[in-house]
């Protein structure tokens, strides 16, 4: 099974890498970093042995990883951390944290190697970590297999298997069951996630439900009033934030904002595309609709009465932006992406709007709806109706935001529960030798 998996992976990369080179050259993005993905050439500076290797695929997972690492360092000071990422945006966020000296910043950053025995084995041998921590749903069979061969435990934290993707994993159950049998601990978000991990072959005794770590993400550094000043918005403006939006969601968001602006002269919009490469398309859509805007990167803190929108064109500021929102729509939910992080706006006491495509965040969405702090829109027209209803009733809107915030407060503690469960695997000790 591993041989077939490796052959298919090699074939896939033989197709993807040339395509990626062409796309990256056209768009100006960094290339696929083959040296790092194959772990070839002279070893860059790596943390001292006996630390942790943490893997987080993209921006949301990296932000969570920074919080997890900070908590690990508080509990077990002095350990080094190497972080691997799967996207350039995730890498940029990690490097920014390192440049700022953030508490959870990694000591080294690189791309995740191709999940083949030699690249994975080479990185493990370079790092010689005491444990590997994987954030959310990144089940890489050869990573797990090579770690087990060297006596390095693997811990999956904030584990999630969405109903939409679970059938694809189950179709290759033999491969994933063999990998999950070697995982030291899976700290799952919900009972449903835990059940899916067990159904995939994870040993029942190594799967625990510790909760959603995103409830323990730190609050934004700035308060809402300060963010509104930076945005150049009046203090009494009705601020509609659309965060982590997919390209196809721009049109319904702008339609909802147009209706809101017609009903409320104070209305302002902050549009935050999920992917940096979508910023240009979002700018074109704003211009086509006649919406005057400024980019976040060009803000100077001055009011701009002739600009009613801000387009966020930088990474990592969305939690701060949510603090200024009167109401927030979270993207990836009107299109079949599964939904993005609903807890970020809820944590700052903001009513949370989302579409029907919620496979990645269904438990959180259901909890927010039940608490009265979340609102599901079936489509773009329903989103417009929800925006108008909430914006038109400030008292109800504030009550909904308070209920969303209270829900997050009640659920806090998942991070400490996770570290308690993983303590025997994460606590410092001598770096494992090569036990192949």
Image (spheres, grey):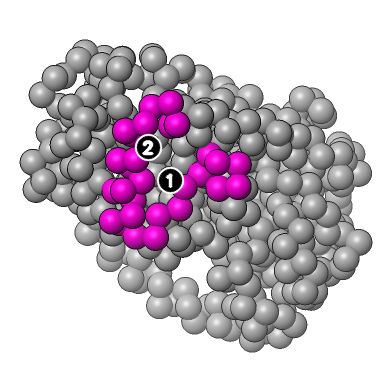
What segment is highlighted magenta in the picture? 369-397
Residue 78 at x, y = what percent?
Answer: 77, 26
SS state under label 2: helix
Residue at figure coordinates x 25%, y 16% from the top left = 234
Which of the 4 image quadrants contains residue 139? bottom right
In the displayed structure image, the side of residue 84 where residue 238 appears, left or right:
left
Nearest the viewer among 359 and 435 is: 359
In the displayed structure image, the side of residue 133 where residue 137 appears, left or right:
left
Residue at figure coordinates x 63%, y 60% from the top left = 138
**Picture quarter with the C terminus:** bottom right
- Residue 294, compared with residue 159, is above or below; it is above
Which residue is identified by label 1? Answer: 353
> In the rendering, which numbered label is found on residue 392?
none
Residue at figure coordinates x 20%, y 15% from the top left = 303
Of the two numbered discs 2 and 1 in the rendering, the one whose residue sits closer to the viewer: 2
Residue 175 at x, y = what percent?
Answer: 72, 79
Residue 242 at x, y = what percent?
Answer: 35, 42
Which residue is identified by label 2? Answer: 390
């Amino acid at each position: 099974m591993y041989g077939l998996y490796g052959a298919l992976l090699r074939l896939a990369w033989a197709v993807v890498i040339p395509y990626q080179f062409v796309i990256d050259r056209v768009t100006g993005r960094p290339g696929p970093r083959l040296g790092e993905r194959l772990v070839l050439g002279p070893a860059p500076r790596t943390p001292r042995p006996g630390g942790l290797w943490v893997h987080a695929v993209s921006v949301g997972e990296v932000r969570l990883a920074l919080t997890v690492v900070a908590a690990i360092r508080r509990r077990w000071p002095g350990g080094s951390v190497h972080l691997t990422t799967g996207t350039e945006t995730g890498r940029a966020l990690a490097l920014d944290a390192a440049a700022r000296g953030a508490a959870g910043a990694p000591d080294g950053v690189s791309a995740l190697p191709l999940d083949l025995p030699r690249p994975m084995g080479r990185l493990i041998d370079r790092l010689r970590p005491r444990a590997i921590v994987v954030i959310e749903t990144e089940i890489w069979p050869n990573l797990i297999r090579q770690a087990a061969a060297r006596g390095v435990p693997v811990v999956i934290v904030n584990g999630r298997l969405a109903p939409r993707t679970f059938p694809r994993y189950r179709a290759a159950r033999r491969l994933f069951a063999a990998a999950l049998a070697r995982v030291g601990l899976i700290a799952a978000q919900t009972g449903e996630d835990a059940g899916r991990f067990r159904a995939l072959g994870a040993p029942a005794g190594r799967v625990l439900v510790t909760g959603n770590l995103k409830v323990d993400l730190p609050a934004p550094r700035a308060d809402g009033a300060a963010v509104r000043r930076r945005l150049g918005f009046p203090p009494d403006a009705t601020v509609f934030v659309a965060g982590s939006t997919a390209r196809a969601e721009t049109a319904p968001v702008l339609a909802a904002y147009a209706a809101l602006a017609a009903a409320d002269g104070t209305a302002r919009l902050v549009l935050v595309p999920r992917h940096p490469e979508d910023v240009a398309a979002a700018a074109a859509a704003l211009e086509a609709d006649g919406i005057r805007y400024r980019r976040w990167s060009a803000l100077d803190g001055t009011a701009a009465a002739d600009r009613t929108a801000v387009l966020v064109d930088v990474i990592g500021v969305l939690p701060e932006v949510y603090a200024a929102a009167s109401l927030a729509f979270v993207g990836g939910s009107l299109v079949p992406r599964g939904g993005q992080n609903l807890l970020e706006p809820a944590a700052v006491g903001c009513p949370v709007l989302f579409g029907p495509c919620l496979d990645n965040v269904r438990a959180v969405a259901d909890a927010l709806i039940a608490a009265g702090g979340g609102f599901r829109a079936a489509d773009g027209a329903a989103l417009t109706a929800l925006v108008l209803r909430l914006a038109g009733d400030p008292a109800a809107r504030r009550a909904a935001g308070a209920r969303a915030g209270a829900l997050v407060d009640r659920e806090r503690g998942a991070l400490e529960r996770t570290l308690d469960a993983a303590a025997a695997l994460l606590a410092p000790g001598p770096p494992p030798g090569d036990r192949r």
